[in-house]
Image: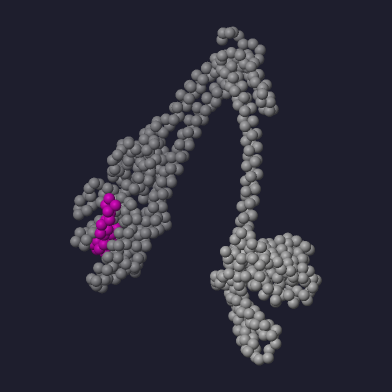
Amino acid sequence: MTITKPLRGLARRIYFAFLMAAVIPTALAGLIGIYVSLDTLRAETLRNLQQEVAVRAQGVGLFFDQLAAEILYLADAAPLEELRVALRTGDRQRIGAATTRLERDYTSLATTYPHLYQIRYMDAGGQEIVRVDKKDSQVTVIPAERLQNKADRYYFSDAIRRKPGELYVSPLDLNIEFGVVEQPERPVIRVATPIGTGSGPNDGMLVINLHADFLLEQIQQMVQARSGTAYLFDRAGHFLAHTASSKAKFSLQPIESLESRFGTEAIKDIFVTADGTSSVANDIFAHAAIRFGPTYPKEEAAPWVIAVAFPERTLFFSVFNLYALYAILGISLLATAIGGYALSRHLLKPLEALSRESEEIAAGNFSHRVEVRGSDEIAGLGEKFNAMAARIEQLVGSLAAHRDRLEDEVRARTAELEREQEERREVDRQMFQMDKMATMGELAMGMAHEIGNPLAGMKAVAQAVQFEEDLPPGIREALRRFEAEVDRLSDFLRSFHGFAAPTAPNLQAVDLDEVVRDVLFWTRKEAKSIDIDIETMIPVDLPPLTADPAQLKQVLLNLVVNALHAMPNGGRLIMSAVADGSRARIDIVDSGSGISADVLPRIFDPFFTTRPGGSGLGLAIIAKIVREHGAEIRVESETGHGTCITLYWPLQL
């Protein structure tokens, strides 16, 4: 099928609609765009150029405002006042000390300001008293024999007549040293203020010299991209100039040298309008005055004008690129017309098939494929479509499997996070428990002090009564046990003290059966009074325990007493023991009221109790003693069905 065959039906309509939609808007947009672009680009460029120059001028003005603050501060500083007083009195020692301080202050300022190269203080006759120079970042204090008299310089005579606190700004000139222009030539600006009391003649002047080229350094970046020239005009009749292509320093020239290029009226217009733009000699000028703040006198408010000049042909060169752009667009339109003719003949049928099968894929039927015959790009597109559909089908299956794996991982991670949170809560609870134990320890120390003295007295009485004659055997045995219990209570108080100052238990081999008999001696009567039956099952061949006997007795006694309190209406208490490897398992089982599930986790917390009148310390002390022995305590209980407390205690093997 050749390209010359006429188009028919929908193909022809598509082709001509496509051609008209491309040609007509492009042609209209091209004509309008050329006109509007020329005008807009010129106006926008001039406006931006003026803004750039104004911002640079404002920045220079701020620099001079900051410098004004510095020089006025130095003029009012104490070292300068001390030097003036010393000069009036002729005290050489004071003159030397004050001069040294001024040299140090001026050196610091010269180091801070990069464009400052000289600071001087002169007396009323123009003689330099203190002078600091800076050259190539090297700051030097000038010795007395090299100081000069500047009374014949114009800036001295102009500035010394001003009032103290007023500032003077000199025109641009070349610095003169010992009657010779300094080499290489460097334009200089001087900022000065007279020193005096205001009620009589001034007795001195503070002068700062600045390199003038720092002004153009602020704006020369603007001309680098446009191949222009930067100017700094001085109202005294001089200017500095610098071009983007020039590598030389700025040169100070008379303003008359520009009149031959720009004309007298154009130069005057720069100073009359101060801020604005103008076109002269095929150049575009943007200029802005440098204005100082209120610290400078009115006549120094705008001594310079910054200007930037660009060749108009260079500035608006980009406009001519529009013509090339529209030429390219015209060629593209022609290519579009030819290509559209052939494209419309081949696209419709295959594209319909692609569209139909795409809808099937979008609906989730990933097994559908398209049949496009031929070897052109459309056929290749059909093959790529089929490859894409196969890939999508494969990816959907992979995503489903991956989703299932992610769900499993999320569930596993969730369970792991729950375990970690539970462990963290347990750590927090233990830390809180330790804080409470420390508080209890402080309380225990006070209790031990208050109870210790009465116990000592009770023990002394018991010992004295035992020496009485004709005592019944039962009474003497009771007194002996009473004395032993006093000792145990004393040990008990010492264990209280251990909360504040922990001590290691006195470990030794202990017969559990003997400790249990001693505990029952003190509790059997109370148990009988409330109809509680106590049964013990301690094997005779049970190895001895590794324990502090007094502390072990304290643990068992507290647990038995707690069990009795849990059975106020009678019941049964069983104490049993059995060897379990390297430890003994000791069970204390009661048939009491039991412990509820919400209370059970807190029973070892200090000061927590559910018994009226209880202190909440008994089980906390037991837990502490158990930990110090390397033992373990477990509690199982159910409300209404009693409690089983199990101790795992190390054996003496």
Q: From the viewer's side, name the closer residue of 568 and 26.
A: 568
Q: Locate the C terminus by quadrant.
A: bottom right
Q: How is the image coloured?
A: one colour
Q: Is residue 7 left or right of residue 335?
A: right
Please give the count of numbered marks on the rendered protein. 0
Residue 143: give x, y in percent of width and height.
Answer: 22, 61
Q: How far across and down, in percent of the image, does residue 43 sit?
A: 47, 36
Q: Position of residue 145 (x, y in %)?
A: 19, 61
Residue 273 appears in the picture as rendered = no
Residue at 33% in and 58% down: 109
Q: Quadrant of the N terminus?
A: top right
Residue 150 shows in this picture: yes
Is 332 placed above or below 420 here?
A: above
| Residue 472 position (above or below residue 95) | below
Prevailing SS of the magenta stretch: strand
- Seen at 54% across and 18% down, the residue is 336
Location of residue 293 (image quadrant): bottom left
Q: Is residue 330 above or below residue 146?
A: above
Question: Any magenta on residue 140?
Answer: yes
Residue 486 is inside the magenta segment:
no
Image quadrant where residue 216 sits: top left
x 75%, y 61%: residue: 638
Residue segment shown in magenta: 119-141
Residue reaching furthest to the bottom: 469
Residue 91 location (% of width, % of height): 24, 72
The residue lying at 32 percent from left, 47 percent from top is: 213
Q: As drawn, is 251 to the left or to the right of 285?
A: left
Q: Is residue 10 left or right of residue 527?
A: left
Give whichever of 482, 22 is nearer the camera.
482
Residue sitting nearer the eye, 80 or 41: 80
- The answer to whether 151 is drawn above or below residue 607 in the figure is above
